[in-house]
Amino acid sequence: MTRLRIDVVTLFPDVIRAFVGASIPARAAAKGLAEYRLLDLRDFTHDRHRTVDDYPYGGGAGMVLKPEPFFEAVDALRAEAPMGPVVLLSARGRRFEHPDAVRFSVGERLTLLCGHYKDVDERVASELATEELSVGDFVLSGGEPAAMCVIDAVVRLLPGALGDHESAAGVPGSRRARGAALGQPRRHRGVADGAGRAADARAPPRPLGAVRGRSIELGAGGRGGSHDGTAG
């Protein structure tokens, strides 16, 4: 099987390094299923202060990440091997969804570009990235949390990354409706003993997401569905 290489261009590689060094991403790397390359955006600057941002053209509040470090970082990656998708994580991007994770998981390479500060120079989105994705209808301080979401969603789909194939193959919003999950002990503070479990098994299943105040409508046979668009 081909190993998936994930490159992350970021101002904070230590944040991503800690994430991919634990749990499922680390397990996938240990099994040879995934490889992570973290590039510090400041390594592609050429001034003594390692400047990566500048004032927006025409004025205005906030700082904008300059295009040159991003382009040079991707040039360095491109010189090593053929590129796959180059994804800019951005609040303006299209919503990242499960089919995207599946598409990335069957490829050989994925590059994630993380912005920060007010914004990223538009030329990074229009001339460098092959697509611009968002993880939800909210604004983050930087692209690193979004990159970690994408990495987790993709890597867990790699065959062997999870011990439970059914868990890896589950699609949010399209798995069979079920009642609330109950574990051990059978009785906890007088709740969910054997009789309670039996009653729960006879009760109609709750809509997925109802616990969080959202409702996911399931189609015929309990397959397929749509969510209310709430982010988070």
Image (spheres, rainbow, N blue to C red):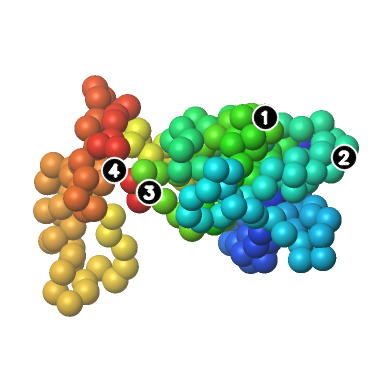
Mark 2 vs 4: CB contact within 8 A? no
Residue positioned most to the top: 220
Percent position of residue 165, x then y: 53, 42
Whether label 4 touches label 1, CB < 8 Å:
no
Return the residue at label 2. 80
Between marks 4 and 1, how big is the CA–CA gap? 31 Å
Q: Earlier in the sequence, mark 2 or mark 1?
A: 2
Q: On screen, 177 above or below 31?
A: above
Q: Earlier in the sequence, mark 2 or mark 4?
A: 2
Name the N-terminal-most of marks 2 and 3: 2
Residue 230 rendering spot, x and y as whole percentages:
29, 43
Pair 3/1: label in front: 1
Which residue in the structure is indicated by mark 3? 138
Closer mark to the observer between disc 3 and disc 4 = 3
Quadrant where the N terminus lies?
top right
Q: Mark 2 and mark 4: span between their CA atoms?
A: 40 Å
Q: CA distance from mark 3 to mark 4?
A: 10 Å
Q: Secondary structure at mark 4?
A: loop
Q: Which mark is residue 230?
A: 4
Q: Earlier in the sequence, mark 3 or mark 4?
A: 3
Q: Quadrant of residue 135?
A: top left
Q: Residue furthest right?
A: 79
Q: Nearer the viewer, residue 160 or 196?
A: 160
- Residue located 14% across and 74% down the image: 190
